[in-house]
Amino acid sequence: CISKNIGPGKIEKVPKENAFLSKELTQMQLDMLFVNLRMEPIYLKENFNIKWFAEAGLIENIAQVIMEYKQTRGLLPLKVFIHGPPGSGKSTIAKELCKHYKLHYVGINDVISKKIADLEEIVAKEPDEVEREAEREGEDFVEEEEERENVEAAKELLDAIKENMQHNKGRKHKYLIKIMKDKLMSVPCRNQGYVLDGFPETYEQAMDLFKEGEEEEAVGKMPKFNQIIIPEFVFSLTASDEFLIDRIIKLPESEVAGTHYSENQFLQILKHFRKINTDDVTVLNYFDELEIHPQFIDIAVYEDSENRLTVSKIIKDIGEPRNYGLTDEEKEALERQAAEERLVKEAQEKAEQKRKEAKEREERMARWEEWNKQQEEVKKQEEELLEAQSVPLRNYLMQNVMPTLMQGINECCRIRPDDPVNFLAEYLFKNSPDIN
């Protein structure tokens, strides 16, 4: 009962001894799980006026118990719809959000392919085998479609879908809505949530997909929507045609081959998108009328190769995840990864510091050599300048001073007076050409 309502619908029988191998279970929890005691609070029922909430037991009240469980622990499903033109990165962004929030990716092509594969698997089995398997595992024939009761019904639906794909390229409104609604109503999407990639595309599709029940609504009256599957957040990616075309042109040929991103096909799809999103009655108007106001994101402003900035903005707008959080193994893996990244970062910082120091030393030596070179050049220029300035002085001395001075020195050397300085001075005074 618990697995069907908040799990995948399957259970695994394991030996009791395996419980002791779980690190997440304490001894007290193990004792509580292994106790074999059936109790009835007779004393409380006879002596206390207590209003029992789930007197019939857990199974009969599983829906209310699950609702309280989710609300108390904040495990409410997170439902997101991503809308935008082709080439805007809807699928990439949707898958990144699923990875971050642990949600289920709901893309129309994937859902249709999975539906056909599931139906083919059912049709391939014998009816008796299907019944035995259902009784053995305690689950329906197809996990996501509880209303399918036998192989004949599955075969009929499979034939109808294949015929639709041959004549309508798999896009007939009737089958699309049924397949997508079944997916959104599946247990995983109801419990954890989903990210809806690009569908519904029109106001009419949105009404049929999210309406509550099959009854017809009065003209002009907004139908009641299904609270279980209606998106909580709607994000519309916006961009100009020129930006999108330029983005597709820059894609590698290997990514474009075999997709709808070929030039002619992409332009047709883009034209169709603009056509169905220019009127007053669009899929975004549908959510506006339900007071689920779309948030518009210009991807040209947050442009990067892997849409990280756009994903970060959407995560900021949505908030924290609504799940159990990380397991002990995931926490240990993240801690190891963080430690490894820290070691790598420290090694890179040390290498960068050494590189900077070596570069600074080289720059210092280069500046020192340049300064010495400049000093030598300045000294050389000063010497040349002094040399040039001293030539007239030397010429003057050679012409006017040195002849008489040399004669006086020679005469002083010949006579050798007691006071050679006074002798030389008197000689210069007596033999000066000006005095003569």
Image: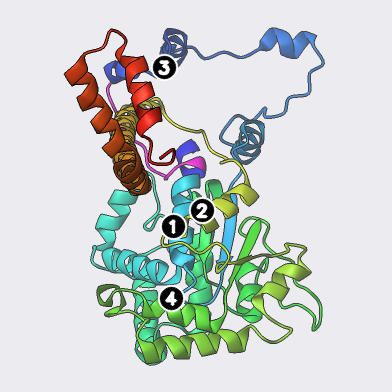
Q: Secondary structure at mark 1?
A: helix
Per the image, label 4 sits on a secondary structure element best described as: helix
In-image side of 174 versus 405 (left or right): right
- Magenta range is 6-15
* Percent coordinates x, y for residue 292 in the rendering: 73, 62
State which tag comes first along the sequence, 3 or 2.
Answer: 3
Q: Which residue was labeled with disc 3? A: 25
Seen at 42% across and 45% down, the residue is 8
Mark pair 1, 2: CA separation: 15 Å
Viewer-proximal residue among 136 and 172: 172
Looking at this view, is 430 or 259 the one in front?
430
The verdict on residue 12 being magenta is yes
Residue linked to disc 2: 189
Corner quadrant of residue 279:
bottom right
Q: Residue furthest front?
A: 436
* Mark 4 or mark 3, earlier in chain: 3
Q: Name the front one of labels 4 and 3.
A: 4
The alpha-carbon separation of the residues under discs 4 and 2 comes to 33 Å
Q: CA distance from mark 1 to mark 3?
A: 33 Å
Q: Main secondary structure of the magenta part?
A: loop
Q: Which circle, 1 or 2, is nearer the viewer?
A: 1
Is residue 46 depicted above or below 192 in this figure?
above
**Which residue bears the numbered disc 1?**
95
Where, quadrant-wise, is the C terminus in this rendering?
A: top left
Are the residues flagged by discs 3 and 2 in contact, CB closer than 8 Å? no
* CA gap, disc 3 and disc 2: 28 Å
Comes first in the chain, label 4 or label 2: 2
Decide if residue 283 is on the left or right side of residue 135. right
For the question of whether residue 372 can be seen, the reply is no
Q: Are marks 1 and 3 in contact (CB under 8 Å)?
A: no
